[in-house]
Amino acid sequence: MKKANKANQRGRTKGASLLCSGYLRRWGSQMNVRGAIVAVVCTVLAGCVSGINRKEAEIHFDAAQRFDVQGDYVSAREHYGKALINARLAGADPATISMLTYNFGRTTGYTCHLDEAEKHLLLALEMEKSITGSESGISTKRQFELARFYFDQNQYEKATSYYAVGIPAVEKLGITESDPIGFAAALDEYAMALAQTGRITEAATAKQKAAQLRQQYPDVKPAFVPTRYKCKQ
């Protein structure tokens, strides 16, 4: 069904394109009235296809979000994927494509399609850096997503590289006030990853910072508890 739906979307766009190109080859070179009319019709057809794709993207995105909240990541992944395909066909803005790429990558990882997940999470981060900058809240969120992704696959060297960028960035954004205990959990993971790569002194520093935050905010709950990438290797 998934392949059929993708084929239908591609076919719809390709069909309109072939229809236009065929008539334009036949009539456009003569630059007569009929050729001009066909050119206008082709423009309208392209707009209609784009509008259909845009609506399909919205429908699938809404469905994906519902499944995402429910924890049905298989269904969420399917609909994020369809939303991404249709958004691209509709010529959506880069921020929308970046967001959909991230959400598709994230749910693809939750469902243990790890190679595909890594590809899309990396792409989403690079896209977001070009849109909002490397230290924006959105880019930083994606840094942490990749850090968790690699940490959960026991790829500690890669995990530390993303934590090392993400941690100072969120500190600048005020994470120690907005979510100190959630940040402490991330520091603990960073410390574990550092220890696994033999960087014991740095690990102790990160662990001490986490302990200080918990001591400073003893009754505070984490504002954000991430979903993990726990897959059998």
Image (cartoon, helix red, strand yellow):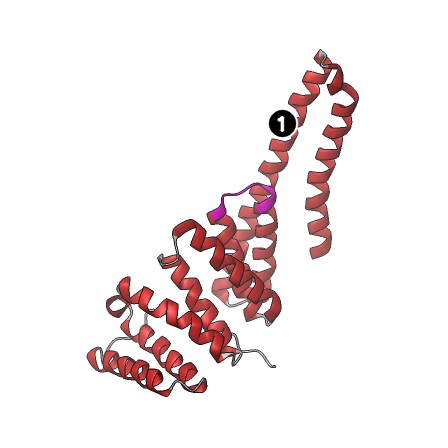
Instruction: Report the residue marked by disc 1.
Output: 44
Q: Nearer the viewer, residue 164 or 44?
A: 164
Relative side of 182 to 197, left or right: left
Q: Secondary structure at mark 1?
A: helix
Q: Residue at 52% across / 81% down in the picture?
A: 154
Name, please, the residue furthest toward the top. Answer: 33
Q: Residue at 54% across / 70% down in the picture?
A: 110
Per the image, is 140 magenta?
no
Q: Nearer the viewer, residue 187 or 222?
A: 187
| Quarter in which the N terminus is drawn | bottom right
Q: Residue at 40% across / 63% down in the picture?
A: 141
Q: Which region of the structure is painted magenta?
A: 88-94
Q: Nearer the viewer, residue 199 or 57?
A: 199
Q: Position of residue 213 (x, y in %)?
A: 24, 78
Q: Nearer the viewer, residue 176 or 219?
A: 176
- Mark 1, Cα crowd under 10 Å, few <14 / some 14-19 / many 20+, is few
Residue 47 sits above or below residue 116 on the image: above
Q: What amino acid type is highlighted by mark number 1?
A: Val
Q: Residue at 50% across / 57% down in the picture?
A: 124
Snapshot quadrant of residue 45? top right
Q: Position of residue 164 (x, y in %)?
A: 38, 72
Relative side of 125 to 38, left or right: left
Q: Position of residue 146 (x, y in %)?
A: 47, 68
Snapshot quadrant of residue 27? top right
Relative side of 227 to 174, left or right: right
Per the image, is 92 magenta?
yes
